[in-house]
Image (spheres, rainbow, N blue to C red):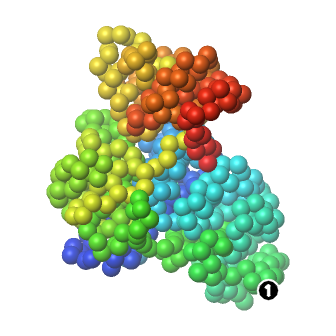
Amino acid sequence: MSTTSETNAPARPATKAGKGGASAAAPRRTFAVISHPDAGKSTLTEALALHAHVLSEAGAVHGKAGRKSTVSDWMDIERDRGISIASTALQFHYNDHVVNLVDTPGHADFSEDTYRVLSAVDCAVMLVDAAKGLEPQTLKLFRVCRHHGLPVITVINKWDRPGRDPLELFDEIEEQIGLRPTPLTWPVGIAGDFRGVLDRETGDFVEFTRTAGGTTRAPERHVPAAQAALDQGDEWTTAVDEHELLAADGANHDQELFLGGITTPVVFASAKLNFGVSQLLSTLLELAPAPSARPDVEGTPRPLNDEFSALIFKVQSGMDQAHRDRLAYARVCSGVFERGMVVTHAATGKPFTTKYAQAVFGRERVSVDTAYPGDVIGLVNAQALTVGDTIHTGERVQFPAMERFAPEFFSVMRAKDAGRYKQFRRGVEQLEEEGVVQVLRSDLRGDQAPVLAAVGIMQFEVVEQRMKSEFSCPVTLERLEYNLARRTSAEDAPTINAASRVEVLQRGDGVYLALFPDRWRADSVARNNPDALLAELPAGGM
């Protein structure tokens, strides 16, 4: 990607313009970091950027006084809570590669955002807490990766703390998600006594040295096996014995099996201390797949060398408080993007120019002149674009729409100050377009009291905070009795709406949703109206 600096974001070398889509895509790696909350995603994202030399010092999710926060968690509510609320893209160059890394929310309440990201990447890095092992949200996220056919690289994180036996963790991974672990490195020292790793390919010992608070790159020293045996004694012997046991059992990396979703390469790390991060970065460049032809809505792959096309997978406002701009994140799927080119919005057939296009590094941005398949670019103030849209040049192409999950929590939102209706309406429209929450409307309730539908209740907290801070419009939320939604049709809506303890509203995308207090009531209405459409929605927990 060729860029023009406009901020103090890390400098990015230009990519030579004029390359075809396929040849320029080869050195690109586009992946998401996924895990259960508090497994260390944002910390690992920060550590990867640090090891790629685009940060001089790593921030912290729960920072001590004087320590900066992470680049990926820039929202006030993220810093206050110490969790990722929204996905964030980071792009940087490393060893002749262009890395497009997306940090995702781990909390199940924001699973729709994570699902969208996984629709736009080529690989996933799954973090597993060394002490806790596989957790519920990790399992759900893996199922989404399998649905999208994404190969998975596993990181056993927090090895600097007391934890479980690595072979026990491997058994759990294989039994619960059906992936066979094939470790690329093996820890020297038990969990809590992390000295370094045995490189299973070379047989060398990679020794780590702690740094103050893990804010800078952890120095590492490659030591021949013979010297490691003298220096580390029984710990080295144990690591070698376990490595040989794994080799005898066939637990060695096979690229074809990895790409086929049968095995998962594994590295051991402590993201907080920056141990093992350089091995992970090298693994990603070497093993993660380059961008490939993406199927359109009819299942026909779009060749990388075809004309430009891209998928909008995220919309975000509030990143620049001074300019109140709106950024649409686009994954380039084919062809070459050039700033200023006129593209077509597939949903409407309308053209628009891309004068303001940017590469993203957390909250920081730089203007981008060209981009290639696999790159993530931000289109500024592209008001017509929403999540799941396709843009293209030349012959029309449309990529599959992104599913909306079944909401389970419903609240009526009203402005505390009726005189701020314009700000209220603008805020509702913006948050709806971003996909922060689903917005349901009806003639009975009117625009001043829309119903917010959420997968998790924390989405309501985000709405309250952003309405107040970004739109200067404090709101009240009144919980409704409904706990279940079914999709219905415009024709059947009046009949369903006439039933007691049921309400039909229309979502922003035109879909009609019938809301019920529980499954028993939904089944009862369905039995009494056998010809009416009452279809289930994709589960929010994935």
Q: Residue furthest bottom?
A: 226
Relative to 440, residue 259 above or below: below
**Mark 1 element type:** helix
Q: Is residue 212 left or right of residue 377?
A: right
Q: Kindly identify the residue that appears in the image at 23 percent across and 54 percent down.
A: 344
The quadrant where residue 305 appears: bottom left
Q: Is residue 235 left or right of residue 330?
A: right
Q: Residue furthest front?
A: 531
The quadrant where residue 431 appears: top left
Which of 216 and 121 lies nearest the eye of the viewer? 121
Dot 1 alpha-carbon crowd within 10 angstroms: few under 14, some 14 to 19, many 20 or more:
few
Position of the N terminus by quadrant: bottom left
Res. 86 visible in picture: yes
* Residue 352 placement (x, y as % from top left): 19, 50
* Residue 109 placement (x, y as % from top left): 58, 38
Relative to 189, residue 438 above or below: above
Q: Kindly identify the residue that appears in the image at 67 percent across and 58 percent down.
A: 128
Mark 1 — residue? 248
Q: How many marks?
A: 1
Q: Kindly identify the residue that appears in the image at 65 percent across and 52 percent down.
A: 140
Q: Is residue 22 left or right of residue 125?
A: left
Res. 452 visible in picture: no
* Residue 355 placement (x, y as % from top left): 17, 52
Q: In this view, does 540 lie to the left or right of 452?
A: right
Q: Kindly identify the residue that appears in the image at 79 percent across and 82 percent down.
A: 249
Circle 1: residue type: Ala
